[in-house]
Image: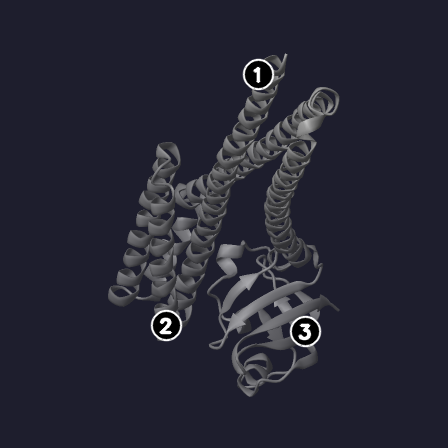
Amino acid sequence: MKDNIEQRMMALFGTVAALLIFVAVIALKNVREAEQSSDWVNSTHAVILEVVAIESALQTAETNLRNYVISGDERDQAAYREAFSETVEHLGVAKSLTKGEVLQQQKVVELEDLVGKRVEFARKVVTALKDQGFEEAKKLIGSDAADQTLRDIKRGVEKLKDEQALLLQQRDRESFLQAQSTRWTVYVAAALNIALIGLIFWLIRDDLKARRRAADAMRLANEQLEEKVTARTEEIIKINETLMLENLERKWSQAILERQFRHFEQILHSIGDAIFVISRTGRIIRVNPPAAKMTGLTVNDLIGEQLGTVVIPDEETKVSPFVTALKEGRDLSGVSASIKVRNGQSIKVLARAFPVRDNDRVVGSVVVCTRG
């Protein structure tokens, strides 16, 4: 009888130990998988950031290239070269981050080829500007409006971001399933352990009263072990919850930035007044759709023109009051003027001008024209 009880006790203790080892193995495995998932998530976020940076740097390069063609300012030249250099650097980082993903890296390489075409186009524009003058460079930029390369780059960037976002969703789902699997494994194992320990206690109480002290010591040891397992489980759950919250915060931050950018573009295009942005030399470098509609010209036709040839003050002066206010760095309001229309007619407007500053230095001006 005694041997039979001991054999059953040993079998029960062996089962408890096997369950504990199983829980420990599963927990360690899930911890490693959680760490790998975290690395994947961080890598995916890094790829998204680099792709966004590629698009942003390329847009900055294109803008500064046009500014340089219009203004001839060496700072604009340095700015567009630096922006192209940053674009190439971000491409290199993106290639490195997608090294283990063949399809993603192939898309990055395609982006790299397209960016190379834009760099080559910039060289042609600058060469034309130096050798043949502003008009030839302007003609090249004007013909570039229908270039498919920029649209391909934008589509490629958006596709990469969408694919990376999908990967994030998949990896978040995997992390959640791993955490859930760990939780249930620990709960079931703990329940089984408690049940087995209860059975052992019943056997010890009824059949082995002489071993009560040893049973009490075993119970205490098991309780301590259970507390450690529970504490470790809670720690793993907290780590997984923290990772999930961080991922959600990153998604929310990215969504907020994209929403702010769209709102800014919508606000600019929703203003009913004609808006002309001019450089320090008085040339138009940007207009909104109402300005193009009011003049009857296209946006490309207006860009590069002197503001004085489009917005003509009623009071004749040697120097345009807008240029004077720009050089003096002050606001200008209540200027009666006429906007020259393509058919030879003119539209009476009331103009205002506001200087644009960069680190306390006036770099341009915004002229707002309201129908009089």
| Classed neighbour count for the residue bearing mark 1: other residues with Cα under 10 Å, few (<14), some (14–19), many (≥20) | few
- What quarter of the picture does the C terminus occupy? bottom right
Nearer the observer, 59 or 249: 249
The residue where tag 1 is placed is 7
Labels 2 and 1 touching (C-beta < 8 A): no
Q: CA distance from mark 2 to mark 1?
A: 94 Å
* Image position, residue 280 (x, y; %): 49, 77
Sequence-earlier tag: 3 or 2: 2
Q: For the point 50% across and 47% down, which residue is it?
A: 45
Is residue 59 in view from this perspective? yes
Task: Please give left or right for residue 235 compared with residue 283 in the image.
Answer: right
Q: CA distance from mark 3 to mark 2?
A: 27 Å
> Is residue 64 shown left or right of residue 282?
left
* Residue type pointed to by label 2: Gly
Q: Quadrant of residue 133?
A: bottom left
Q: Residues within 10 Å of mark 2 (few under 14, many from 20)?
A: some
Of badges 3 and 2, nearer the viewer stands 2
Identity, as a three-letter code, of the amino acid under mark 3: Ala
- Helix, strand or loop at label 2? It is loop
Give the mark, 2 or 1, whose residue is nearer the N terminus: 1
Expressed as whole percent of the image width and height from the top left, the position of residue 16 reads 59, 26
Residue bearing the label numbered 2: 72
Tag on residue 351?
Answer: 3
Q: Crowding at label 3, few (<14), some or many (≥20) Cα neighbours within 10 Å?
A: many
Tag 3 secondary structure? strand
The quarter of the displayed image where residue 226 is located: top right
3D distance between C-alphas at marks 3 and 1: 100 Å
Quadrant where the N terminus is found in the figure: top right
Q: Nearer the viewer, residue 5 or 41?
A: 5
N-terminal of the two: label 3 or label 1? 1
Asked whether the viewer can see residue 73, the reply is: no
